[in-house]
Image (cartoon, grey):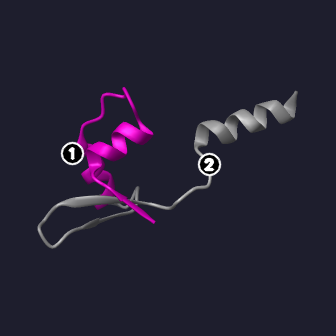
Amino acid sequence: MRKLKPKAYLDEVYPDAGICPKTVINWIKKGKIKGEKTPTGRWLVLLEKQSESHVSSLIKMLEAAT
């Protein structure tokens, strides 16, 4: 499991989407994504490790369809 700060999560999963880190914190609080609050009061997004990225898996699916 990987732990990312909200800004790093946005940069990795939603680049150039214009979403602010506070939105990610709200998603964690509402249970839309997994996250935790550290003892110092900071929020972290919990991501399960994936063997490949979403983009590469989509490319493989498209290649298989042709």
Q: Name the foreground residue: 52 vs 33.
A: 52
Q: Relative to residue 9, is residue 66 drawn left or right?
A: right
Asked which secondary structure carries label 1, the reply is helix
- Rendering coords of residue 53 (x, y %): 58, 44
Residue 55: in magenta span: no
Q: Is residue 48 above or below residue 39?
A: above
Label 2 belongs to which residue? 52
- Rendering coords of residue 16 (x, y %): 36, 26
- Rendering coords of residue 34 (x, y %): 39, 62
Specify the farthest residue to the right.
66
Query: Given the image, on which type of amino acid does mark 1 rest?
Result: Lys
Q: Give the range drawn in magenta.
A: 1-29
Q: Quarter-wise, where is residue 7 in the image?
A: top left
Q: Name the foreground residue: 26 vs 17.
A: 17
Q: Name the foreground residue: 20 vs 64.
A: 64
Q: Residues within 10 Å of mark 1 (few under 14, many from 20)?
A: few
Instruction: Give the quadrant of the C terminus.
Output: top right
Q: Relative to residue 42, is residue 1 drawn left or right?
A: right
Which residue is at 52% across, 60% downward? 49
Which residue is at 77% across, 31% downward? 62
Which residue is at 13% across, 65% downward? 41
Residue 8: in magenta span: yes
Q: Relative to residue 45, is residue 25 drawn left or right?
A: left
Q: Is residue 38 above or below residue 62?
A: below
Q: How crowded is mark 2: few (under 14 residues within 10 Å), some or many (20 or more)?
A: few
Callout in the foreground (1, 2): 2
Q: Do the residues labelled 1 and 2 touch (CB within 8 Å)?
A: no
Q: Which mark is first along the chain, 2 or 1?
A: 1
Q: Is residue 2 above or below residue 61?
A: below
> Label for residue 22?
1
Label 1, label 2: how far apart the Cα atoms are:
28 Å
